[in-house]
Image (cartoon, helix red, strand yellow):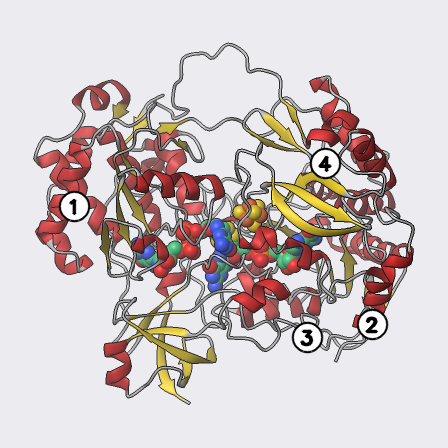
Amino acid sequence: MSTTTITRRDFLKISGASLGALAVGQMLPIKVAEAARQAGMLDANGNGYIPTMCEMCVWRCGVRAKVKDGRVVKLEGNPEHPHSLGNLCARGQSGLMNTYDPDRVLTPLIRVGQRGEGKFRQASWEEALDLVASNMQEIKDKYGPEAMIFSSTHNLSQVQFENLLNAYGSPNYGTQRSLCFNAMIVANQMTYGMEEPFRNYGGLKYLILTGRNLMEAISTSETSILSHAIDKGLKVVYIDPRFTKTAAKSADWCAIRPGTDLAFHLALLNVIISEDRYDHDFVEKYTVGFDQLAEEVQPYTPEWAAPITDIQADVIRRIAREFSDAAPNALAHNGWRTSNFENSFQTQRAITCLNALVGNWGIHLLPAAAEGAGLGAPPQPPYPRASAMRMDGVPWKYPLVPFKLGVFQELRDAIIAEQPYKAHGWFISRQNPVQSLPDRRKTLEAMSKMDFIAVVDIFLNDTAWFADVVLPEASYLERYDPLNVVGDLAFLRQPVIQPQGEAKSALWIYKELGKRLGLEDFFQYVDEEDYLRQQLAPLGVTLEEVREKGYARMPGGGEEGEFTWNTPSGKVELFSDTLNNAGFNALPTWEEPPRPPAGKFYLLTGKVGRHTQFATQNNQLLHKYQDEPRLWMNSASAKALGLADNDLVKVTSDVGEANIQLMVTEAIRPDCVYLTPGYGHVSKGLTTAFGVGASDSVLHVTYTDPVSGSQALSQTFVSVTAV
Ligand SMILES: Nc1nc2c(c(=O)[nH]1)N[C@H]1C(S)=C(S)[C@@H](COP(=O)(O)OP(=O)(O)OC[C@H]3O[C@@H](n4cnc5c(=O)[nH]c(N)nc54)[C@H](O)[C@@H]3O)O[C@H]1N2
Ligand SMILES: Nc1nc2c(c(=O)[nH]1)N[C@H]1C(S)=C(S)[C@@H](COP(=O)(O)OP(=O)(O)OC[C@H]3O[C@@H](n4cnc5c(=O)[nH]c(N)nc54)[C@H](O)[C@@H]3O)O[C@H]1N2
Ligand code: SF4
Ligand SMILES: [Mo]
């Protein structure tokens, strides 16, 4: 067992019951407390509300944190935040338990046992930072900066993490994007010349959701807008092999065969074109390649698609007609992860074409605002040129994948293969690749090849468990982060309590590492507050003013020019020359997905409303209210296998196996099983989550779409047997 950090009793001593003995407000950051008092947010005893932002998922809803006697006692929604509109989801409300989790890492840790044994000793920041920096410098000197891998998942201080890796000079950067939405982004870029248009639900009458489980896989404002729109009569067609909470709120649920969403959408295109139901005006003025598309989809009739998708031909035809009848108030949602198959990219392309045919641009699809434009930034010199090729194959193997997206799973596999060269170090921040990459065995193998691994997290997560040094970040209620721009507002994350233990902000950690690596010119901010002041400079507001409301208004946009799509033709590209020139299908074309051999099931994954990814299972409140995960199996399949509800079963894929209890249900196709992601943690430093459930990442085989670099999780097939 680990000799980590601080015991539960120590924790209570510093943060819990004994706090009553402290002077009131003593645990509040002094400047924040001063400003809050002056603004009348805190009473004379230091109790009241401080505005900040949630970080329990990427939506970063506005929060009003209720503080009492120097502790956060409740989190409420900030009504002025456009994401939450005054509400917080179950995860957001439970956020204080992440901050007060007895498993928090509160001092830097240095490994003392074997890697993966979980034995660490506490260390000072000085020692831990020196150790990380000297290893990074040694790797750079011996093997070049490319031998150091960096990886992190979307967060507000990521801009400075990227600053560190770019200044250091490594081209090897892994993010969650290729595990998540590469197919959607690259398809949108090919058709529209932008990453993701904004979806406007105002006046929308008909919506097709393809594997976008918005009622559980929450996108705060969109989830609530959708919910209200359904109440007001929006008709939703939901396509998912599983009956989810979104299916329950939809007019139609089509239990599609996994991986065949492309056939369904091609058939919709076929009906709309062959029955002359498309918006001629929009197609002629604003698209290229319609004739080629019309020819391409000719064979894809509903009768052709029915046996492939298991959706009846008359249902497909009805949906196509209803969809086009509702034009332009019809929308095919581009989803994020669609079918989770290698052909998802073509499905995404088909979805973009469908939207063009009903002419919903400018009404239900709008260009998204540029992120963060208008804020100031610390000055810095240009980055050194990274001369080595990227290990993830961008662009030499994946010519259309933007550098920013990358192909993380390929990077991991290249580390194992030591191709095109050998990597020696890995710096991971705010990410849990041991859980989030498919095929855990491979991820652990890649980690075992490293001379050195450093992790920045708030917990000893499953990846930190295998690290040499763990650097503890202050929790989101204890730190500043760079501003977050949402629409025309820039929101502030400010500490509502002092960091516990020795935890520090990521802005501080990266700057300290930069200093030790001789890269101080890239980190020209004195501290977090100075960083924010530099960001706010062009806005003409002071940090003190922003603290009070929790946000600043961005300067009004300039004159809006006429909109054109940023594609080579300046139009919506139904036929894409870019795809053609790169040797890929320029039109959405049928690509047959693999099917499970007899006796095997498709293994489905998908979010649940009360957890975020692999990060919240240790939260004691969320843990209490979320049922322990079981493997969903259709009752007919269970019967055929002689299995009953709650039986312990063994799930076996080509790369791993896991034992888990069965949940017999009608809510899934007979040829599929489903497992909630985020369980089966390996770190014993997560004392609440450890030993609960099983990990689907152990089972997932690594498949990658050659066009977008997206992984394809539903392509993993498993057998299920009684234990
Ligand atoms: N509560 C909560 N909300 C979240 C998150 C979270 O962790 N927790 N994560 C956020 C993130 S990062 C993301 S990317 C989004 C993801 O949100 P979604 O895009 O909705 O993704 P998932 O929940 O992964 O999968 C959605 C559905 O796809 C279905 N599916 C699997 N294979 C197929 C197929 O072949 N065809 C079709 N049509 N459906 C299929 C699954 O059964 C599942 O119900 O959610 C975001 N919101
Ligand atoms: N099997 C399976 N695999 C999947 C998915 C799936 O549905 N099933 N979903 C995919 C998707 S859509 C995505 S986006 C990826 C996500 O994959 P990851 O990005 O790897 O997963 P997260 O769980 O978001 O990792 C976040 C880490 O940040 C830590 N953390 C939380 N708060 C803080 C903080 O304030 N500071 C710091 N430094 N750390 C913090 C948490 O402890 C956690 O270790 O996974 C992908 N992989
Ligand atoms: S959706 Fe929930 S977890 Fe995500 S930021 Fe909003 S309140 Fe927090
Ligand atoms: Mo994601």
Q: Is residue 302 left or right of residue 191?
A: left
- Say which label, 1 or 2, has the lower sequence index: 2
Q: Quadrant of residue 467?
A: bottom right
- Say which label, 2 or 3, has the lower sequence index: 2
Q: Is residue 226 above or below residue 627?
A: above
The residue under label 3 is 684
Q: Secondary structure at mark 1?
A: helix
Cα–Cα span, label 1 and label 3: 50 Å
Numbered badge on residue 384: 4
Numbered badge on residue 267: 1
Q: Is residue 390 left or right of residue 136?
A: left
Nearest-to-viewer mark from 4 and 3: 3
Numbered badge on residue 9: 2
Nearest-to-viewer mark from 1 and 3: 3
Q: Is residue 168 above or below residue 492?
A: below
Position of the C terminus by quadrant: bottom left
Decide: marks 2, 3 in contact (CB < 8 A)? no
- Say which label, 1 or 3, has the lower sequence index: 1
- Say which label, 4 or 2, has the lower sequence index: 2
Which residue ends up furthest to the top in the rendered image?
A: 559
Residue at screen point 32% across, 86% down: 643
Cα–Cα span, label 4 and label 2: 48 Å
Q: Secondary structure at mark 2?
A: helix
Q: Is residue 528 above or below residue 368?
A: below
Q: Is residue 638 visible?
A: yes
Label 2 crowd bin: few (<14), some (14–19), many (20+), radius 10 Å:
few
Position of the N terminus by quadrant: bottom right
Q: How far across and down, in percent of the image, does residue 7 sit?
A: 81, 72
